[in-house]
Image: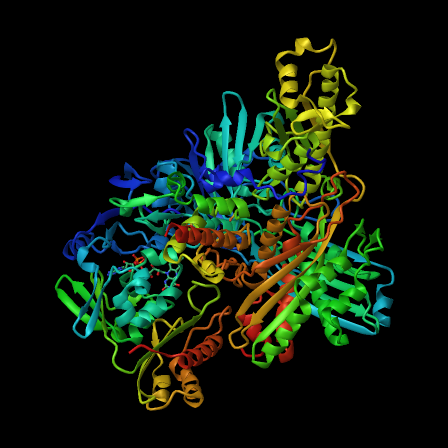
Amino acid sequence: MTSEKAHIGQSYRRESALRHLSGRGQFVTDLALPRMLHAAFVRSPMARGKIVELGVDDAAGSPGVVRVFTAETLNGKCEPWIGTLDHFANMQSSTQNMLADGEVLWVGHPVVMIVAHSRAEAEDACELVMMDIEDDMAVVDGNAALMADSPLASSGISSNMCFQTVLETPDLESAFAQAAHVVEGNFNFGRHTAVTLEPRAIIADFDRSTGQLNVHHGTQTPYQFQDVYARHFGLSEGKVRVIAPDVGGSFGMKLHVYNEEMATVAASLTIGRPVRFVADRLESFVSDIHARDHRVSARMALDADGTIVAMDVDDMTQIGAFSTYPRTSVAEGNQVIRLMGAPYRMPDYRGRLSVVFQNKVQTSQYRAVGHPIACAVTEALVEYAAEKLELDPFEIRQRNLIADDAYPHTSATGYQFEKLSHQASLEKLRALMRYDTLRDEQATLRKQGVYRGIGIATFVEITNPGATFYGVGGARISAQDGAVVRLTPAGDVHCAISVTEQGQGTETIIAQVVADQLGVTPDKVKVVTGDTDTTPSGGATWACRGAGIGGETALRAGRKLQAQILTLAGEILQADPTHLKLANGAVVDATTGNERITLAEIGRIATYRPDTLPNGCDNSLTAAQHFAPSGYPFDFTNGVQASYVEVDIETGITRLLKHWVVEDCGRIINPLLVDEQIRGGVVQGLGPAFFEECLYDDIGQMTNATLAEYLVPMAGEMPDIEIAHIETPTLDTILGAKGVGEAGTAAAGAAAMNAVNDALRPLGARISQTPMTPLRILKALGHV
Amino acid sequence: MKTEITLTINGEAVQEAVTPRTSLADLLRDNLRLTGTHLGCEMGSCGACLVMLDGAPVHACLVLAVQASGHTVKTVEGLNESGEIADLQQNFYERNALQCGFCTSGMMMSAQALLAANPGPTRDEIRDALSGNYCRCTGYEAIIDAISATAAQRMTNAGEAQ
Amino acid sequence: MKSPAFEYMRAESIAAAMTAYAEADGDAVYLSGGHSVVPSLALRLQAPALMVDLSEIPTLSGISLEGEWLRIGAMTRHVQAITDPLINKYAPLFSAAAPYVAHPAIRNRGTLGGSLAHADPASEFPAVAVAIRTELEIASPTGIRRVPADEFFLDIYETAIAPGEILQAIYIPVPVAGQVIGFDEIARRRGDYAMVGAAVQAVMTDSIVTDMSISLFSVGDRPTRAASAEVALQGRVIDNASIADAQAALSDDLSPTDDPQFPAHMRVLLARVLLGRVLSNLKVVA
Ligand SMILES: Cc1cc2nc3c(=O)[nH]c(=O)nc-3n(C[C@H](O)[C@H](O)[C@H](O)COP(=O)(O)OP(=O)(O)OC[C@H]3O[C@@H](n4cnc5c(N)ncnc54)[C@H](O)[C@@H]3O)c2cc1C
Ligand code: FES
Ligand code: FES
């Protein structure tokens, strides 16, 4: 007999993997619709300028071209958007529309849209567009942007300050005044970008005969886009269907509103044919959101025994010419200043945030929003303090982490932690990485001129956000999810759910959760996601909410259906439903486990022979359930990572030898998938720590905007990653699962930076800028 | 002006008229709808487009379709149907060596070529063989594990066959 | 990233290729492996009217020993530098360099001739060609000539191949007794173009350097012979002292360009470190 929790907690494999392995993926980029047209964009070659004249006649006459759009002929179709939210007091951003109107605001800003029979022909026509743009002074550097004499990054703003805020506890100043030790640092976190392997892709298909707009969109949030398209193009929501089939990576990048996607929808609405836009890699670099780009100065106060008493942080982050829509470009900085010092008991804190406009690609939420910055700064300062106080990195953390028995706890920045496991995690890490042996090895090698470093970083991660995240600010971003679970006539299970799949395994874990509620095996549960016409409305997949919120929704829907089935079975069997339960694909006697009637038989009777049911008996075998988190505003998770790095001190080249993660994401639904989320996340943290950076020159040109020059992490440079878990389920839900998707990314870079600095320490060098390139390491060493 | 080409794709003779600028990748994906071959960069940097050309992996984004005329191409669809990568596929599945799946066919092309040339690669050699295959999702380790497991199984099977 | 339109011609002979090129009034580009040309088309950096495919011309293929020279046909793929026994034996520095060139799939397709003709100053093979004193055989409508590698590379992407001419083959003098080689590069990631690279070939007689050729790449507008460093080693045993002198001499040999992401003095520093490492790890080949 299968126990009640038979499937939750097991490493089920993903059925969709089989499709991909046989070449049967169904990505938006693979789709071809009848009479489909292809879009390409002429983009601004300069960071800031006035459009004097556009000549599109030659382009319009180019072979294969169907339509040429400019702001004048396209923008009227779309209600403009503004990337501000009410709960970010006094934030500002200019109004945006699809094509640049009057002024160009970054290199890559779309100016003209060409729609043609093929992408190649559209690109041919792009070369024939005459653009006369008068060069203006671009705002490139964030600090300069805040000077009184700086030009503005766009004409619709009163200053280059998008948003400013301060968090401060009353005793901050005195904490610093009385501190025995103060350590401080200035940090630079480079701008990088998502580089999903499948670029952004959309096919908008408007059928004039019915007024139906179908949008095949490589996104993680189909409902959000259904709402956006309906509102901004004046359509009723019921006439807008957004379908997100297989998505080739997303990581937050594919949930923002982009000019090109909106323009593609507008073009289809105008022409009445399917229009496809797939960003090529060059376009991705200059139009996908970028991430991070922070300058942080921070100090930490400690008392004589190494207890952290306060942190004082100033973060200046540079976001491009607009704040993104509908989530803003402020959430990242806001999370940076709120996550500082989060793992520690630290009572006092001040965090200042300045979010600054400039003429570059917009930055916005990307995997682990704000976490890597807060973690790297906090953990670097802890490391500096350990050095100053001559404490072992483990020792100083042990002294300061919130004790595992001290929950609930509220951080100095106001976050409420239900229950975390920092101490247990730290202890587990120490054993996992064989810390003492590693230190011995490090010492031995150092005598031979080999410089290796060990770095650790503790973190908390925000998961399962409730409506306080965006909803309160007026954003139409769903904080709830929905599922419809039904028993098919043959006794199989079908679950349509609003959370989406981008390869994390969402569908697999939902099947596991539902299976456990209905006493079937997960392979009997078909899970459908990613289509606004066939799944209930919900927030989908972002901020690590798929497992926690989506899983809970599925669980509750499953239980609802379970009750319906048992009631019906009771009627059929003339038995008391409370004496029945579901197991092994059947209704069984709750005490003996003996099979009473199979699910297939119930499906058959309810579907084909409802006439045999007692009078007035409800034959429904479909249950709908929505769920919004309540209780804590977020479910925080925690963990600790360690990195082992070798630095070639003559060349500045680093080699990542090994990485360890101990993570507590609450109830683990599928250990295999959780570990692979963590591994992928770690590498997305290590990439920007060592390689990834969007480089700009002083006139705002991105100078490495190809995949040959922008260095993504590759197999040869990445380490093996060992993972262990602590399981502290949240009591806010029945399921108890929290999120895990961002945990790897949150602290990997911080651990790596501490490791590099540990390697450099005997040479008196320190690096506090990412990526940690050979040049920066050699500079830190004073060699160049 | 279109040019007539004839080539063998996944064991089938194919005749197509293409413009000379059409890449082999676009021929496969757009004309023949073999969409298991993906495009991630169109300049040789990501490996999503790898196919077997005359038995060796090449970037379909960097080969013109006209250049492939008279030659033999195998894509993931063909390797899947022939069964020659069944064990590799099984190990990728078991080890969850893919998330979004966009890099997967390219990864398997590189793996297949590596194992043909070097049946018992070290982890480092596997990582080296994947130096041109970008994956944003997995962090690579699971892919290395899956290839390593396939190598071990093939060696055992070859040993038993002897 | 779709190429502009062009016509395509698959040449069956060198003569046919040159004729087609001439008839296009110079608005043509030769195509070998295509792994430099095709990306540049996709980026729309060039838009020739005609692409002349050289890859199926029989006389451009083949590797053979001709007396004291190894002849490598221009169409030889990068991978063959790793797998071909004749190259392994008679041009081992090409074999040593090949694993550093790009990635396996690119090596299946990219050609040695294409790499030399393309003359990217960051490329491995041109530097090797210079280090081992190859001669490059060039076909022109008026005849065939052989150009020593030292005179072949003229500038960034510029060689002694005049428009319309075709590089046919690479001639390599077979190793002499006492020959040693060394190759290494410093790159950010495996397979990336090097930040700095070094190809070294020397002849040692009774542990004394009697001939030294050091060819550095990614340090200037073309593969760069480090003449002063060579002189510093000539007639000496390779030891810490002579290596240090060679490293010091590099500042006379190199004048790389300055870039905020890669300052000139960093390049010189890396070249010194690398040269030291390569000289300390020379391998006897004959
Ligand atoms: C992602 C990527 C990474 C790479 N990394 C490296 C690397 O690390 N190191 C490196 O050295 N290279 C690297 N390359 C370049 C690769 O090695 C090229 O293939 C090679 O340099 C050019 O060879 P080809 O046969 O492809 O030439 P093609 O691209 O066909 O031609 C290159 C140029 O030479 C001309 N040409 C070609 N053959 C002849 C001939 N026989 N006679 C006259 N002219 C001719 C062509 O007209 C063209 O101008 C990389 C390429 C890619 C796509
Ligand atoms: S698409 Fe061919 S290598 Fe990226
Ligand atoms: S699985 Fe998504 S890119 Fe590899």
Is A657 on the left-hand or right-hand side of A378? left
Q: Nearer the viewer, residue C30 or A303?
A: A303
Q: Measuring from the top left, give residue A115's x and y in whole percent.
A: 43, 37
> Where residue A212 appears, x then y in whole percent?
54, 25
Viewer-side residue, A268 vs B134:
B134
Residue A190: x and y, percent?
Answer: 59, 61
Q: Residue C121: percent from the left, percent from the top?
A: 36, 68
Residue A678 in the figure: left or right of residue B24? right
* Residue drawn at the location 80% of the way across and 61% of the way down: A349
Q: In which quarter of the image is residue A40?
A: top left
* Image quarter of residue A146: bottom right
Residue C118 visible in the current orientation: no
Q: Is residue A24 above or below residue A750?
A: above
Indicate whether A131 appears above or below C78. Answer: above
- The picture quadrant where one finds residue B21 is top left
Q: Which residue is drawn at 58% across and 55% down?
A: A684
